[in-house]
Image: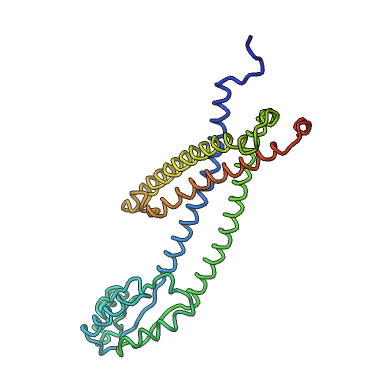
Amino acid sequence: MKNKHAISPATFINSKVTVIVSISLVLFLLGLVFLLAVFANKLSVYMKESLSFDIVLSDDTEAGQANSLLIQLEKAPFVKTVQYISKDDAVKQYIGEDPSAFLGFNPLPSIIVVNLNSRYTEADSLPVIEKAIKNFSTNVSSIEYRNDLLQLVNTNLKKLGIIFFILAIVLFIISLALINNTIRLMVYSKRFLIHTMKLVGATGGFIRRPFIQANFLIGFIAAILANGLLFWFLYYLANKLGDASVGGGITHISDIISFDALYMVFGMVMALGIMISTVTTFFAVNRYVNMEGDDLYYI
């Protein structure tokens, strides 16, 4: 005779699929948080390194002396990029007409535009850098930079970092709670089975083992699905940004995020999927292992 209360294989499989999909979506959310962290750091570096200052050279600076200073600057650890703009190039770039025709001379100086490495863009680093540059050459007339602009950018980036950090913590807690509730509901449906195993003499470790093994696999599969969604999201984003960018500047995922950072995000999603699933299962099963049989009817 067929048992009316038996769970059909289809129902069992559907419940597992539901749990896997639920956890994979939560892990996808966590993965997006990690990706945003990478993007925020990349944006911070880009903003800092886009700020530049000018090294104004004296009028008697010869081409060889300017080139020697360029070589020293390129070797300096605080320099990201340098660009030499001669007096003639400055006229073409900033005025367009030769002032010698009506002034009799070119009043514009030769300059070297310097972009710093992001870790050297703090306001207290600039006086030290200015002193080092002046020691490189006696042809340096002055160094012009916007200290107020640099401080404003650093202040806003720090505020943005704090806001993002709080947002990431909140999303992580929400994600943790969602996975925890999903696992607890699944174990809750097996609480009477756990009690039956206790009655026949099964130990706590014996009872926990199949649940932990099953949810380890669920966490692993969910993490793979989440990573697949993340890769698809980045691929879709790269294509959309590539279509919108001038000259097709973004054509590949690596234009958005480095592969090293991508592998790190995938690894974190995988580790969290497995770890949260197994740890949550351990405590959820342990609760019913330690619970009296009569109490199972009141929860």
Can you see residue 189? no
Seen as rendered, the residue at the extreme top is: 1
Q: Could you tell me which residue is drawn at 77 percent across and 30 percent down?
A: 297
- Horizontal side of 226 relative to 8 (left or right) equals left
Indicate the quadrant containing the N terminus: top left, top right, bottom left or bottom right.
Answer: top right
> Up-down: is 116 above or below 262?
below
Can you see residue 227? yes
Residue 82: x and y in percent read 31, 74
Residue 130: x and y in percent read 40, 84
Colour mapping used in the image: rainbow
Q: Could you tell me which residue is drawn at 54 percent across and 70 percent down?
A: 155
- Horizontal side of 226 relative to 208 (left or right) equals left
User: Residue 161: which quarter of the image?
Assistant: bottom right
Seen as rendered, the residue at the extreme left is: 64
Indicate the quadrant containing the C terminus: top left, top right, bottom left or bottom right.
Answer: top right
Q: Could you tell me which residue is drawn at 42 percent across and 46 percent down?
A: 234
Q: Which of 265 and 162 is in front in this view?
A: 265
Residue 39: x and y in percent read 46, 56
Q: Nearer the viewer, residue 190 or 61?
A: 190
Residue 75: x and y in percent read 30, 76
Total of numbered circles in the picture?
A: 0
Q: Nearer the viewer, residue 173 or 42?
A: 173
Q: Could you tell me which residue is drawn at 37 percent across and 72 percent down?
A: 115
